[in-house]
Image (cartoon, rainbow, N blue to C red):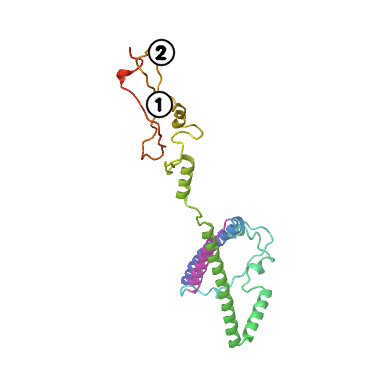
Amino acid sequence: MQREEKQLEASLDALLNQVADLKNSLGSFIYKLENEYDRLTWPSVLDSFALLSGQLNTLNKVLKHEKTPLFRNQVIIPLVLSPDRDEDLMRQTEGRVPVFSHEVVPDHLRTKPDPEVEEQEKQLTTDAARIGADAAQKQIQSLNKMCSNLLEKISKEERESESGGLRSNKQTCNPADTNALVAAVAFGKGLSNWRPSGSSGPGQPGQPGAGTILAGTSGLQQVQMAGAPNQPQTMLSGVQMAQAGQPGKMPSGIKTNIKSASMHPYQR
């Protein structure tokens, strides 16, 4: 008798531990649903369901263990019913049951579902028994087909959303070409310095070139200074602006006549 009592107590302790773990997991999951629903993700929900499923399987294994006695053979009889508040009962039930009276005993010591639930279960069992094997197989195939179509639609929408995201992120310009164009416009990088033969030569646009300035002096060939009548002085009649064969410069027909330094008019 003592051995059976010890075995019953050990089984009850193991069962209470499993139920406490299951209760904590349910409490944390309910807290997430009520307070963290705005940032709750589907993988997190699946993890919570997987944890609860594993704990329920462990609880079933404890109940089906060969060393676990049949709890259905154990009967719980209320010895004292009182409408007064019981502090020990409050502590053991974590504040859920303040009194152990005639009102709460039928609910907490019930070993069967509510009568309404029993009637619904009987109705469902009767309806299931009326369906033949062929009709049940057809319904199963129809349900599988509906699930397959639904999964195919979900997969198609996921693929379309992924392809749309890739199209929106596709690059429509070449950064290297853009940088080269900006450098060419702003700094003239990469542009050629070649000019056609009809250009005005080096200098800023709108300013006359050296050839234009010297064009008015082509009629002045020689000038004789008053202080030196015997020394004919020769001035620059023209300047050869560009050598033949040099690109970008216009050749000039004006020749240069410069005498030696010994004939300088200002020499004393």
- In front of the other: 159 or 70: 159
Q: Is residue 234 above or below residue 179?
A: above
Is residue 193 inside the magenta stretch? Answer: no
- The dominant secondary structure in magenta is helix
Residue at 67% x, 77% y: name it: 120
x and y percentages locating residue 16 in the rendered image: 52, 64
Residue 226 badge:
2
> What is the spatial separation of the Cα atoms under label 2 and label 1, in whole angstroms?
20 Å
Label 1 secondary element = loop
**Residue where numbered disc 1 is placed:** 237
Residue at 44% x, 32% y: name it: 211
- In front of the other: 39 or 215: 215
x and y percentages locating residue 150 in the rendered image: 58, 72
Q: Is residue 47 above or below residue 174?
A: below
Label 2: few (<14), some or many (≥20) within 10 Å? few
Q: Which residues are magenta?
A: 39-64
State which quadrant residue 128 falls in: bottom right
Label 1: few (<14), some or many (≥20) within 10 Å? some
- Is residue 180 shown left or right of residue 164? left
Number of dots carrying numbers = 2
Amino acid carrying mark 2 in the image: Ala
Disc with the residue nearer the chain's start (2 vs 1) = 2
State which quadrant residue 231 falls in: top left
Amino acid carrying mark 1 in the image: Ser
